[in-house]
Amino acid sequence: MTDSSSAVYPQLGMYIAGEWIMRADRTHQVIDPATGDLLGDLPLAQASDLDRALEAAERGFRVWRRTSVDERARVLHGAASLLRERVETIARNATREEGKTLAEMRVETLACAGLFDYYAEEAKRVYGRVLVRPTGTRSLVLKEPIGPVAAFAPWNFPVHNPGRKLGAPIAAGCSVILKPAEEAPASAMAVVQALIDAGCPGDVVQLVFGVPDEVSRHLLASPIIRKLSFTGSTAVGKHLMRLASDTVKVTTLELGGHAPVVIFDDCDLDRTVETLAASKVRNAGQVCISPTRFYVQQGIYDRFVEAYAARMERTRVGNGLNPDSMMGPMANPRRPVALAELVRDAVSHGARVRTGGEGIEGPGFFWKPTVLSEVPDSARVMNEEPFGPLVVTAPFATLDEVVEQANRLPFGLASYIFTENVRQANLMGDALEAGMVGINTTAIAAPDAPFGGVKQSGHGSEDGIEGLAACLVTKTIHQI
Ligand code: NAD
């Protein structure tokens, strides 16, 4: 195992048509969010680079769609093994560019390896069917890879998001042009490098960085691209969906959430507090399924808020490379500014700050774990995703009332329920408008479990057999 303390932050680049491109006229400065230090200069694509990536993706698709599933599985299993071998170096560099703790980054890197292994196996289980027809005639239903995919991955899971954008399409026989977030390029480079080292042909995966709006407009205008896969905010998702509509591309969109958490007075209080505290500070709350709107039944409201605020206060915040840190900095300077504004607005609407509510002095973009109580629906934070370590709480009386509250927003990604009453859990699970529901748990992502939302949280799933199906099209052949 490599000693992570000796990992050197790599020279940054793009991978186009089988070549690493380490220089460009324009660059983006990559910053360590824990220190504010410059980590490196990232080359950004020009239109001509994107055209070369499109041509390569077209060639790559022609080759890869004809490759045996055994070969695709070999590449994915090989990349998974390399990610495991390289986990210490990858995790350290990812923590430096994104901020989350090294322990979290190790888990994330291993989860990416697990996803590649899962799709290596699942690629072998893409089945068509034969329809009942008169003797001597046939009607066949075939599943074929959809074609070159343009995939946009955000910065919050710098290794796993690129892995999600690559695993299923590569298993299905597609080529991919991946544009990860410019904030965390070394992490995405490491995932692509693992695939290349495992034998993935150069034209099958393209890695580009650029000015996001330029890249997405260019790629989505091209008829070569057959599918858009985007993870990020609802606002950007809507914009990309419009761009994709001109050439009628298939879309998979994993957008923002505002996860409601319904805590009934019969829950196991200590376990609920601990589960929700650990889950909220994960990646400093910059997680689309982060538990956020806590509706607590009135009988335990005061006791819960007090215990939860005290537990959140014990979070040790610091550089993610420090083994003592339980939570790192926010990933970029935009988040603390947004959080400060949401807290100010909530307080002006009558909310109480029970802990936190402000940033931490010094270099880096640190923010204190924050709990607000008595937050009215009129406060912005009750309606906009905070995407940070911020929890809002409000009391409720009855199940019907809390269902209405939980479903009030246009989002529907993750929802959580804490209760020891099975019937109540079942009723809530059915009533919540969400793509994913956790009952007495916040662990709702797994390679074999579809991950995605409803309403304005997006459509289509990643992971699971649904993630593979989303990279396939159906063809029916009739023969007499
Ligand atoms: P943002 O809306 O500017 O960007 C979100 C993501 O989309 C980033 O990765 C960005 O690089 C990308 N992006 C932006 N404009 C794009 C374009 N025209 N074409 C292609 N990609 C584009 O916000 P941000 O400040 O980076 O992140 C904060 C917000 O984004 C949060 O409030 C949250 O809602 C959302 N977000 C969601 C997820 C998720 O997992 N669903 C992840 C990261 C960010």
Image (spheres, rainbow, N blue to C red):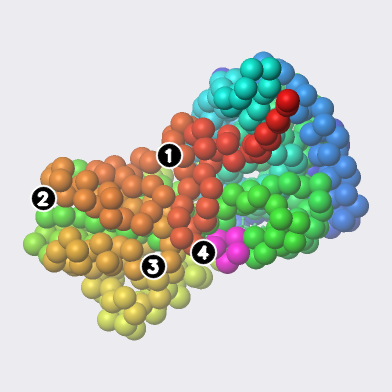
Q: Name the residue under label 1.
A: 445
Label 3 sits on residue: 409
Mark 2 to mark 1: distance in Å? 26 Å
Question: Cβ of disc 4 within 8 Å of ligand 1?
Answer: yes
**Label 3 to label 2: alpha-carbon separation:** 26 Å
Q: Distance between the residues labelled 4 and 2?
A: 35 Å
Q: Residue at x 86, y 55 (%)?
A: 46
Helix, strand or loop at disc 3? loop
The residue at 37%/62% (across/down) is 390
Disc 3 to disc 4: CB gap under 8 Å: no
In percent of width and height, residue 429 lies at 27, 49
User: Can you give x and y, in whole percent of width and height, for residue 226 in the image?
Assistant: 73, 46
Q: In which quarter of the image is ligand 1?
A: bottom right
Q: What amino acid type is highlighted by mark number 3?
A: Leu
> Does the beta carbon of the residue at mark 3 sit less than 8 Å from ligand 1?
no
Q: Does the beta carbon of the residue at mark 1 sit less than 8 Å from ligand 1?
A: no
Q: Name the residue under label 4.
A: 335
Earlier residue among tags 1 and 3 = 3
Q: Establish if 4 lies above or below 230.
A: above
Which quarter of the picture shows residue 80?
Answer: top right
**SS under mark 1:** loop
Callout 4 amino acid: Arg
Q: On the rendered structure, is 274 left or right of 443? A: left
Q: Mark 2 points at which residue?
A: 266
Q: 74 above or below 465?
A: above
Residue type (three-letter) at the residue carrying disc 1 = Ala
Q: Which of the two labelled residues, at mark 4 and mark 2, occupies the earlier sequence position?
A: 2
Q: Dot 3: few (<14), some (14–19), or many (≥20) neighbours within 10 Å?
A: some
